[in-house]
Image (cartoon, coloured by chain):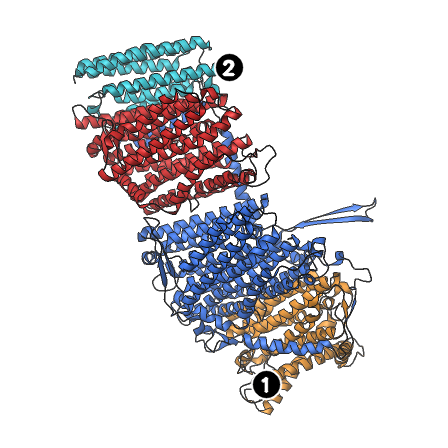
């Protein structure tokens, strides 16, 4: 673990020293990051595969007299450390080439600053999940925010990024304020900062305080995780960062917030015995469902590739939260509740790592498109599949995975979530059960919409004709970037085809957190090749699937179909222009993303509040139309309805107050006199 | 040894002030300036070691205890930083014509007289001497505020001297009342020595002490810039020459706070700790709340920093008001942290203003492009002022919060946090707008002068260090200082 | 190989059976439609002839199409057929070796649909995109409802595995149905045309570019590729019908004797015929809906399914 | 302390309040200055009375210094500045004089109510010196808050400091001499600086320094 720290530290330091030569800084810094990630992998695997219940602790130097700093890696921490390290490896492989290729204009100082921030960012995240006390947690939490802020604003210094960074900082800072209260309320009870003491101090909390603290913490973490309606910063900040950092922010940083929720909900604040208060789980479940649906709906209407991906992060966080909330509802309920809670938590954690894998992959692919074309609006791309085959193929892989389609990993975790939801529904009769099933239906809707969205994203970006010269002259990304993507793509396939083996890694977190059966005991009871989830109380009639067999079957069938496809007389295909009712096809004939998403915009108009304006240029008579200009936009409801109003309100208020102040000195004196008068009346009169 | 130091310390700047009048050469003046500040630092460290070894020392009307030592350290460190900064700043100011080359010596003399009075306020044991020195700071710094001599400067100086003099006269009235109570108890020739009064504090008449404390609170609170008596502060701090602004914001208001703390100790002993805590809490909250809108809608960079001082003094008052060991400790730590950070902020702002020739933040754009190092320092200072780790203010605000939560002051905590977040937004908005974007053609692109950067580096180093750790010796000092207050 | 608790071999046999019978079902539906519209109509084997012809032809490929285009039909066909492996045809009861459940089945169909849409976008040109866009608009609305129908039976059975579901329902046919079953079945009947791409949601016969959904996506495919796509859509249709029958009126013969299998086969044929007739009736008695009326139409199914679930759970 | 001393002090206090009201109501700057001088004279007398009563020598000195500085020197300085500046003699008040007087009444009532609520303070400070002192101090500031010209603000400042002096003298034990001297010196220094500023503004920008209000918000 110290090795990991050393590596990140060395990376930061090296990039600081090497600020004269950007190339060196990039190389060394990313190398150090890679080493740190590998070390992190080692640590986490060591804990996860070691004997369950073992906690790796490591005292840190006492920096502050009032708090003893320490690291404590238990199953949960190790799992999230694993997620972080997995993506960090890809980012470290991908980073140098990207930074060089995307912004060659950037001076060495700026590149060095970026690498420095990257190392700090990774280090803070790794230490955050390993933190054994509140102080370390808070310091790393803010350090993580600060480093990512630097990365966001450093990408290119135009106002847009600065605004995105500002919004990001302010909202997360607000979240941190909530966290501060939640933490300090515990530390002041405990008189110490380490988690063990907090756990003990939370033992004798009364119900209302406990719930209040949980909601404070949940609010704080939800801001970071981008839960609707606290998500507005996310689709701005994530795209603004360099792409491998976007991958880290979307794929990992949001998960750190999930870690915080789990740590608080199941560990620190959990009552000594008995189930959690019902309000916790239901809040999380509802928040998750709303985020999932709204996230994908807004993603559908985005034409900025990275923004689209960022909105999908909102969606996937929602899916994870559905699992978490369900686990909270079911935990320590009688009967097979415990088992079901394990299934739900397993689904959530599995989706956590899955989302890290495919969202990281997608962001990296989007990044290589970006650094080759310098265009983020997919309307201006197209036809890239023939010029960047690797990128296109890997993006398609990620698209299938994130759409929750078999045989890739997205399907597995969504399947587990569905099973858990059904189990919950069969346990709770009455409205509770109905609510659970309804969120299952919403989850299904989410999956379908995600598929639609990525059909659009992939099709419009990579297929058809190139719409602009940038897309026309794109070339394949350098091999080191491809390597980073391939690593994540391999993860997607492996987790999809053989998920049973991943369950082994989930044992420690699930068992450690729920004090119940481990993941593999429940989900892969029939061997690693078979996933099963017991729905009934007894868990007798369990639903079982085998991703492995299904993948094998698919391959076999594909082989047969391949032969069939070659046809009886295998002649090379003639090529001809695309059929466009007999006209000569041009790029303008291709279906645009706007047009693709239009029907869904109609269907969900209530949520989008679409605004469109059509301007016609007619030649004298309205019947002869020279040109039609169509402009349309959709608004983010929470943004326009909540944030803009609040912001406008505060600004207007302060403007007026400031305008009121006349710089007259007798006014100043009057204030002093009045204050004294009032103070004497209030405090002076003897009781 | 320590006793001699007690009278040597105020003498150093006083003598320097006189020595300044003997020469006109800028180089020599700056040399003397830096040298005497360095001597001051050295002597203070010596004194600190003595006190750490042998406890509080007193000599006549002077006395140094751990509480005073905290403020003294802040004072001398900032003085040194200011001296280093002034070297480069003067060059630019004279070049532009803000400072007249022939009148420099009076400027230096006034600055050191100002420092001398502040040293006396920190070291004073006799409450009367404390008051006299405080009024002395007002007079000297008022002249410095109006030093540029243009209309705005004089206006600010007038407001400053009038309002603070009123405040201080209230302070005198409070002092008289407390003295009356003490003299009544002691009988015979009563004394105004704080340490002596503390001996008998529990037996003082609570009623009269209460009124006395209110007068002191309003009076020295005016000087400390607590709302709603703060109105002069943004004017004065924004119009003064940048080094003076740093001293005003960084040290002077802290000296006033020290005076309040001394009387708080007496009042707490006489009327029970609840009463002064309550008063401090109210004024702290008012300050934090009142500062917010002016920070959000501010256009003038230095006024922004001025209002920020109001907020942070409010935070210190909150910490004292929350009371208890934790809260008081946090308050003292915050005094130091804010002093360092605010001086850094003023330095960075001063260089930026000199570069763009305007204090209007809408005119300052793309600082990172034209002055990367200074811009980085500005951003660091802004982030620290906003309470971001790993910078020092985060730690002290954390301590203050702990104090509040420990005493269950939920309402105060809620208001405090909301305001802090809003201010964070405003400050970061302003800082980001200045740092990023495209720099106007008018902006000076000459390389950055070394001495201001050196001064900023010194302060930034302390800032980050205190954000990452609290050295054991410093912690021990703060602990003992806390005991002096809380008992 | 044919012995044991419905082993892998039997599963594969059933799958092959579905693939072979898929075109026949289409043929029958066409024939019935023709009859209902007082036409002679082509023979029921016409789809087979079309397929044979297509596989004999050469390929014309759009010049803008990328490397993916060639493999799209392969993957689509594979996914659809794999879905076929999950439908209990001859008999009920969970297979000895688990492969997948209803969710997996729906997932595979969704995968096929996704790939089809991608392929449609590959050639460029307006019609493919139009078809893909509309298909991907309808699909997200259909899938949740389908899942809810599945859930409405799964909640009772405690599993989403079709074989186990069928076994749980046992031989209790219409007689044993509860209100929830009726509503669920109603929802399924509403969804069937949408899922099989038929009037009133889609029109399989038209090649008028502006009205077609599924056909629009196939415009650029030709020869064996088109053959694969056609075969895939035949299979998809029969798989959907099989899903309905497995959910609502399965045969449940646990024996593995030849008689049981024959009985199962007969029952299956009967069920498929009934559903095919229903589709034919609907197609020839309704007109195609405008695209933006389709959501309202599907809403009926949604309400039915939700009510079914409510009844099942409350 | 003998009862008649207390009564004398109380009478002096009443007179002081009367002079303060004169300052508040003064229509012309000169009147205000004369009133301050008279007030300082009364303070000096009070000092003398207390000195005889307590036999405290310091008080004699203080009384003398007060007489010299506050009753003669400062009023003269003010007078000189006024002549030097040739300001309009009329008082420009922020709020009507009637309202000012009403506020004054409120302040006086408050201070007496305040000290009445204290009880045992009476031994510490002679007679009604405490409430009178509070009232004088606040009233002096009230003058500053309700007048627009710089000179009036200086006048008000001195008046309010008279209040402080009165209370300080009335502290039964008397204040340490050195402190009193220091305080008075400070007051003189402040007065000089203020006077310089006033004149400087008058000379550079032809305006009353107290009427500058460009710095706001």
**Residue highlighted by disc 2:** D206
Tell me whether marks 2 and 1 sit on the same chain: no
Q: Are marks 2 and 1 in contact (CB under 8 Å)?
A: no
* Chain at numbered mark 2: D
Identify the secondary structure beneath mark 1.
helix
Q: Provide residue A206's location: percent of width, then percent of height.
A: 34, 56
Q: Nearer the viewer, residue A577 or A531?
A: A577
**Residue highlighted by disc 1:** C9
* Side of A523 where C259 appears, left or right: right
Q: Provide residue A71's location: percent of width, then percent of height.
A: 38, 58
* Side of C174 where A198 appears, left or right: left
* Chain at numbered mark 1: C
Q: Provide residue A644's location: percent of width, then percent of height.
A: 55, 44
Residue drawn at x 66%, y 54% is: A373
Chain B display color: red
- In the picture, the quarter occupied by the N terminus of chain A is bottom left
Report crowding for label 1: few under 14, some 14 to 19, many 20 or more residues within 10 A (C-alpha): few
Residue A510 in sight in this render: no
Any idea which chain is the cyan one in this picture? D
Report crowding for label 2: few under 14, some 14 to 19, many 20 or more residues within 10 A (C-alpha): few
Q: Nearer the viewer, residue A272 or A641?
A: A272
Any idea which chain is the orange one in this picture? C
Q: Provide residue B374's location: percent of width, then percent of height.
A: 50, 38
Any idea which chain is the blue one in this picture? A
Residue drawn at x 52%, y 25% is: B95
- In the picture, the quarter occupied by the C terminus of chain A is top left
> Is residue C130 shown above or below A682?
below
Q: Nearer the viewer, residue D205 or D106?
A: D205
Q: Nearer the viewer, residue A230 or B70?
A: B70
Identify the secondary structure beneath mark 2.
loop
Mark drawn on residue A534: none
């Amino acid at each position: 673990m110290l090795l990991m720290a050393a590596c990140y530290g060395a990376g930061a330091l090296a990039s600081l020293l090497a600020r004269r030569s950007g190339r060196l800084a990039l190389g060394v810094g990313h190398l150090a990051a890679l080493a740190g990630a590998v070390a992190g992998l080692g640590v986490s695997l060591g804990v996860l595969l070691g004997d369950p219940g073992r906690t790796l602790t490591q005292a840190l130097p006492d920096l502050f007299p009032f708090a003893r700093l320490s690291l404590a890696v238990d199953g949960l921490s190790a799992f999230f450390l694993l997620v972080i390290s997995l993506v960090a490896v890809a980012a470290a492989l991908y980073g140098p080439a990207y930074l060089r290729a995307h912004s060659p204009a950037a001076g060495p100082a700026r590149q060095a600053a970026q690498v420095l921030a990257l190392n700090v960012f990774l280090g803070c995240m790794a230490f955050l999940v390993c933190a054994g006390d509140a102080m370390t947690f808070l310091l790393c939490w803010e350090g993580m925010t600060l480093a990512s802020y630097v990365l966001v604003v450093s990408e290119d210094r135009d106002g847009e990024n600065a605004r995105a960074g500002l919004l990001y900082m302010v909202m997360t800072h607000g979240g941190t304020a909530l966290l501060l209260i939640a933490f300090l309320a515990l530390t002041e009870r405990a008189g110490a900062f380490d988690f063990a003491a907090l756990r003990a101090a939370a033992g004798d909390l009364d119900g209302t305080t406990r719930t209040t603290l949980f909601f404070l913490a949940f609010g704080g973490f939800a801001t970071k995780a981008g839960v609707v309606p606290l998500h507005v910063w996310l689709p701005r900040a994530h795209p603004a960062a360099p792409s491998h950092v976007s991958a880290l922010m979307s794929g990992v940083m949001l998960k750190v917030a999930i870690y915080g929720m789990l740590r608080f909900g199941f560990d620190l604040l959990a009552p000594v015995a008995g189930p959690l208060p019902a309000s916790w789980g239901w809040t999380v479940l509802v928040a998750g469902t709303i985020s999932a649906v709204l996230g994908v709906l807004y993603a559908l209407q985005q034409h900025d590739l990275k923004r689209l991906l960022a909105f999908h992060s909102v969606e996937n966080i929602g899916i994870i939260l559905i699992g978490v909330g369900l686990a909270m509802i079911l935990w320590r309920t009688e009967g097979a509740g415990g088992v079901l809670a394990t299934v739900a938590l397993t689904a959530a954690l599995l989706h956590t790592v899955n989302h890290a894998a495919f969202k990281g992959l997608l962001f990296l692919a989007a990044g290589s498109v970006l650094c080759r074309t310098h265009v983020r609006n997919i309307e201006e791309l197209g036809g890239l599949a023939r010029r960047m085959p690797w990128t296109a193929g890997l993006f398609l892989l990620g698209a299938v995975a994130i759409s929750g389609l078999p045989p890739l990993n997205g399907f597995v975790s969504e399947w587990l979530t569905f099973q858990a939801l059904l189990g919950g529904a069969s346990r709770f009769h009455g409205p509770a059960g109905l609510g659970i099933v309804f969120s299952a239906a919403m989850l299904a809707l989410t999956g379908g919409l995600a598929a639609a969205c990525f059909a659009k994203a992939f099709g419009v970006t990579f297929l058809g004709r190139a719409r602009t010269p940038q897309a026309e002259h794109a070339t394949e990304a350098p091999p080191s970037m491809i390597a980073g993507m391939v690593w994540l793509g391999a993860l997607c396939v492996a987790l999809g085809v053989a998920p049973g083996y991943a369950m082994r890694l989930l044992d420690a977190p699930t068992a450690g957190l729920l004090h119940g059966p481990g993941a593999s005991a429940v989900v892969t009871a029939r061997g690693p090749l078979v996933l099963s989830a017991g729905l009934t109380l007894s868990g007798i009639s369990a639903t079982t699937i085998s991703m492995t067999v299904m993948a094998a079957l698919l391959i076999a069938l594909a082989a047969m179909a391949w032969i069939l496809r070659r046809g009886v007389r295998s002649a090379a295909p003639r090529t001809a222009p695309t059929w466009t009712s007999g006209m000569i096809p041009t790029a303008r004939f291709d279906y645009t993303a706007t047009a693709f998403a239009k029907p869904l915009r109609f269907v969900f108009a209530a949520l989008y509040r679409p605004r469109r304006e059509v301007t016609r240029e007619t030649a004298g008579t309205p019947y002869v139309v020279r040109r039609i200009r169509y402009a349309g936009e959709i608004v983010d409801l929470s943004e326009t309805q909540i944030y803009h109003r609040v912001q406008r309100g505060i600004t207007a208020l302060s403007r007026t107050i400031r305008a009121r102040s006349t710089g007259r000195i007798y006014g100043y004196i009057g204030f002093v006199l009045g204050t004294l008068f009032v103070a004497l009346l209030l405090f002076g009169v003897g009781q | 040894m320590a006793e001699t130091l007690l009278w040597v310390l105020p003498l150093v700047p006083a003598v320097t002030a006189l020595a300044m009048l003997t020469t006109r050469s800028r180089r020599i003046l700056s040399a003397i300036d830096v040298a005497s500040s360095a001597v001051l630092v050295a002597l203070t460290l010596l004194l600190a070691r003595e006190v750490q070894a042998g406890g509080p020392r007193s000599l006549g009307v002077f006395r140094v205890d751990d509480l005073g030592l905290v403020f003294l350290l802040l004072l001398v460190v900032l003085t040194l930083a200011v001296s280093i900064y002034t070297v480069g700043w003067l060059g630019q100011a004279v070049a532009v014509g803000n400072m007249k080359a022939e009148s420099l010596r009076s400027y230096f003399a006034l600055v050191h007289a100002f420092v001398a009075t502040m040293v006396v306020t920190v070291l004073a044991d006799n409450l009367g001497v404390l008051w006299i020195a405080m009024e002395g700071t007002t007079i000297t710094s008022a002249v410095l505020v109006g030093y540029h001599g243009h209309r705005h400067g004089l206006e600010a100086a007038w407001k400053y001297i009038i309002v603070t003099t009123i405040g201080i006269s209230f302070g005198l009235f409070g002092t008289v009342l407390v003295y009356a109570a003490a003299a009544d108890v002691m009988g015979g020739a009563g004394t105004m020595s704080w340490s002596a009064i503390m001996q008998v504090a529990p037996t003082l008449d609570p009623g009269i002490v209460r009124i006395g404390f209110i007068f002191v609170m309003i009076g020295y609170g005016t000087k400390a810039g607590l709302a709603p008596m703060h109105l002069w502060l943004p004017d004065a701090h924004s119009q003064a020459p940048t080094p003076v602004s740093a001293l005003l914001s960084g040290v002077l208001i802290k000296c006033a706070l020290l005076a309040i703390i001394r009387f708080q100790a007496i009042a707490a002993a006489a009327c029970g700790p609840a009463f002064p805590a309550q008063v401090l809490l109210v004024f702290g909250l008012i300050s934090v709340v009142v500062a917010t809108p002016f920070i959000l809608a501010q256009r003038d960079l230095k006024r922004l920093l001025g209002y920020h001082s109001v907020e942070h003094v409010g935070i210190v008052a909150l910490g004292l008001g929350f009371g208890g060991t934790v809260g008081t400790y946090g308050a003292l730590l915050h005094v130091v942290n804010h002093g360092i950070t605010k001086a850094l902020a003023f330095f960075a702002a001063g260089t930026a203003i000199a570069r763009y020739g305007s204090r209007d933040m809408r005119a300052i754009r793309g600082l990172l492009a034209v002055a990367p190092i200074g811009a980085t320092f500005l951003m660091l200072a802004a982030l620290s002022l906003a309470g971001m780790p790993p910078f020092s203010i985060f730690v002290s605000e954390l301590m203050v919060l702990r104090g509040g939560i420990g005493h269950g002051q939920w309402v105060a905590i809620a208001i405090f946090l909301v305001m802090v977040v809003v201010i964070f937004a405003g400050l970061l908005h302003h800082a980001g707008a200045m740092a990023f974007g495209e720099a106007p053609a008018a902006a000076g692109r000459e390389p950055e002068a070394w001495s201001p950067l050196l001064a900023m580096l010194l302060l930034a180093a302390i800032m980050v260090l205190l954000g990452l750790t609290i050295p054991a010796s410093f912690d021990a000092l703060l602990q003992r200082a806390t005991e002096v207050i809380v008992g | 190989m044919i012995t044991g608790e419905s082993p892998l071999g039997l599963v594969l046999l059933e799958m092959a059976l579905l693939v072979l019978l898929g075109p026949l079902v289409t043929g029958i539906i066409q024939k019935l439609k023709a009859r209902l519209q007082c036409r002679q109509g082509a023979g029921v084997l016409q789809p087979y002839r079309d397929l044979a012809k297509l596989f004999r032809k050469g390929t014309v490929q759009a010049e803008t199409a990328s490397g993916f285009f060639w493999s799209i039909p392969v993957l689509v066909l594979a996914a659809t057929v794999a879905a076929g492996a999950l439908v209990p045809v001859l008999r009920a009861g969970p297979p000895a070796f688990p492969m997948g459940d209803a969710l997996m089945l729906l997932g595979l169909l969704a995968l096929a649909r996704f790939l089809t849409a991608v392929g449609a976008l590959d050639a460029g040109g307006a019609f493919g995109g139009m078809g893909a866009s509309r298909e991907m608009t309808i699909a997200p609305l259909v899938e949740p409802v389908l899942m809810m129908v599945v859930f409405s039976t799964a909640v009772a059975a405690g599993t989403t595995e079709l074989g186990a579901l069928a076994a749980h329902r046992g031989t209790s046919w219409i007689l044993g149905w509860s209100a929830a079953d009726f509503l669920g079945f109603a929802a399924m009947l509403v969804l069937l045309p949408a899922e099989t791409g038929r009037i009133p949601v889609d029109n399989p016969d038209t090649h008028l570019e502006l009205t077609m959904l599924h056909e629009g996506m196939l415009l650029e495919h030709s020869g064996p590729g088109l053959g694969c796509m056609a075969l895939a859509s035949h299979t998809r249709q029969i798989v959907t019908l099989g899903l309905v029958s497995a959910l609502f009126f399965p045969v449940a013969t646990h024996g593995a004797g030849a008689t049981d299998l024959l009985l199962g086969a007969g029952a299956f044929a009967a069920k498929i015929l009934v559903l095919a007739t229903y589709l034919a009736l609907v197609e020839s008695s309704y007109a195609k809906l405008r695209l933006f009326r389709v959501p309202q139409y599907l809403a009926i199914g949604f309400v039915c399914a939700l009510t079914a679930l409510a009844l099942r759970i409350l | 302390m003998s009862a008649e001393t207390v009564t004398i002090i109380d009478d002096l206090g009443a007179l002081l309040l009367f002079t303060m009201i004169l300052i508040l109501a003064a229509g012309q700057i000169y009147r205000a200055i004369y009133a301050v001088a008279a007030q300082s004279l009364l303070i000096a007398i009070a000092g003398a009375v207390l000195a005889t009563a307590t036999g405290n020598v310091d008080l004699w000195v203080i009384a003398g210094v007060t007489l010299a500085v506050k009753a003669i020197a400062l009023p003269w300085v003010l007078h000189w500045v006024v002549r030097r500046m040739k300001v309009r003699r009329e008082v420009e008040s922020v709020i009507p004089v009637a309202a000012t007087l009403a506020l004054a009444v409120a302040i006086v009532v408050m201070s007496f109510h305040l000290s009445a609520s204290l009880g045992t303070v009476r031994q510490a400070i002679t007679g009604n010196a405490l409430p009178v002192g509070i009232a004088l101090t606040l009233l002096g500031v009230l003058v500053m808050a309700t007048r627009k010209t710089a000179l009036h603000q200086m006048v008000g400042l001195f008046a309010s400091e008279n209040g402080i002096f009165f209370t300080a003298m009335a502290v039964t034990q008397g204040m340490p001499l050195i402190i009193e001297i220091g305080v008075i010196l400070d007051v003189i220094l402040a007065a000089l600086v203020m006077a310089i500023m006033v004149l400087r503004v008058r000379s550079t920008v032809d305006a009353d320094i107290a009427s500058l209000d460009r710095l706001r918000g």
